[in-house]
Amino acid sequence: MLSFWESDFYTSYDHIVVGSGIVGLSTALSIREKLPNARVLVLERGHFPTGASTKNAGFACFGSLSEIAADLEKLSEEEVLKLVQLRWEGLQLLRQRLTDEAIDFRNYGGYELLRANEVGVLEQMDRVNTLLKPLFGQPVYSLVNERIESFGFPNSRVEALVFNPFEAQIHSGRMMKRLTALATSKGVEVMTGAQVVAFEEQSGCVEVALANGPKLRAGQLVFCTNAFTRYFFPHADLEPGRGVVLVTQPIEGLKLKGTYHYDEGYYYFRNYENRVIFGGGRNLDLKTENTTDFNINDRILNQLKTDLQELILPDTRVEIDRVWTGIMAFGPNKKPIVERVSPRITMGVRLGGMGVAIGSKIGQQLAEIVCQ
């Protein structure tokens, strides 16, 4: 039974946000920026953000050459430019809010490894550079084959190397810690271990039921649950996508410095100090990886280990320190879903594996909707 004080002050809010990842906290923070006196509560079912916000590899990127070329097969040039702009502006907003120092932002640039069956994408480089020039003011992608050997990649496996000077890396743990601290400093309340099991829209509010907890009320309810959205909206146009990530033990004399992609961005690796963080391979087994289960797919992990030894760090003794998974959400194209579901319920989901880049802007867009 709730006390008078609990009932009076702990169960009623102006806005409740479900999900404490990048989008959820950015939404709550954006609402407080627009409505400084609003009571805003963020609900998180786990101790940490559940999906991928603290489980990603820490890439501050907006798409490799082959990724954008693939997007152009599904979307118009105008749509692709808007998508890249959303990612780029999202990264700038993240940096502005949290500071580069706080998130360990390091602009070493990014590279894409092209193998024999992938070099054809170079024919699209001029088109993509022309498309993106209004946003960046200069060509984004350039060929730097002379660096293949300096990074230690085998010439027998890597035929071309494409450079992007705008790509960077961050520390995802520091980012989320800082984002949480900033949100709470602005008056946002965060409740962990609070699993939403049901909600009901009523005439003057939305009632939210928690597992083993009290019922809460809010004027507006916002879902920032990405891959887990189908728990609440079974017909949402998205599919979960599990990603495997590993980190090596420290490697003496590591030559890698920056962020790297190959196979249309399905594989990605970077240095963290003198370690390598490496993830991906979802496309090896898309059906199995279409899940919200956090188990590790041994087939994918074994391929990561093989590529780590044969492609990324040949002739180098490597030991794996840790392996984990994160859960993303994808759709028929890379466009996120940001929409009002009903007069008091809104969602911002389906980030397409680009949560670091677009999460802050999606939160800003959601705040625009719910604060109208």
Image: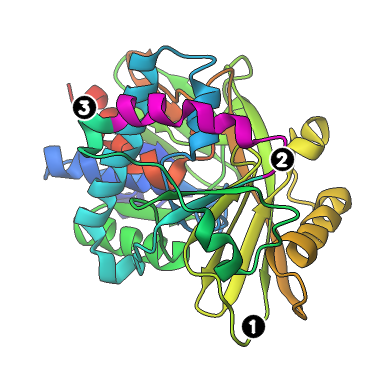
Residue at horizontal 39%, vertical 52%? 167
| Residue 84 on image: x %, y % | 36, 32
82 with respect to 65 (left or right): left
Q: Residue furthest bottom?
A: 252
| Residue 4 on image: x %, y % | 32, 50
Q: Is residue 23 above or below residue 94?
A: above
Q: Nearer the viewer, mark 3 or mark 1?
A: 1
Residue 204 location, quadrant = top left
Q: Nearer the viewer, mark 2 or mark 1?
A: 2
Badge 2 amino acid: Ala
Secondary structure under tag 3 reads helix
Secondary structure under tag 2 reads loop
Residue at horizontal 56%, vertical 75%? 255
Nearer to me, 5 or 360: 360
- According to the image, label 3 marks what residue? 368
Question: Secondary structure of the magenta portion, mostly?
Answer: helix
- According to the image, label 2 marks what residue? 116
- According to the image, label 1 marks what residue? 251
Q: Earlier in the sequence, mark 2 or mark 1?
A: 2
236 with respect to 208 (left or right): right
Q: Residues within 10 Å of mark 1 (few under 14, many from 20)?
A: some
The answer to whether one can see residue 218 in this image is: no
Q: Residues within 10 Å of mark 3 (few under 14, many from 20)?
A: some
Residues under labels 2 and 3: Cα distance? 46 Å
Nearer to me, 114 or 101: 114
* Residue 167 colored in magenta in the image: no
Q: Nearer the viewer, mark 2 or mark 3?
A: 2
The residue segment tinted magenta is 115-132
Badge 3 amino acid: Glu
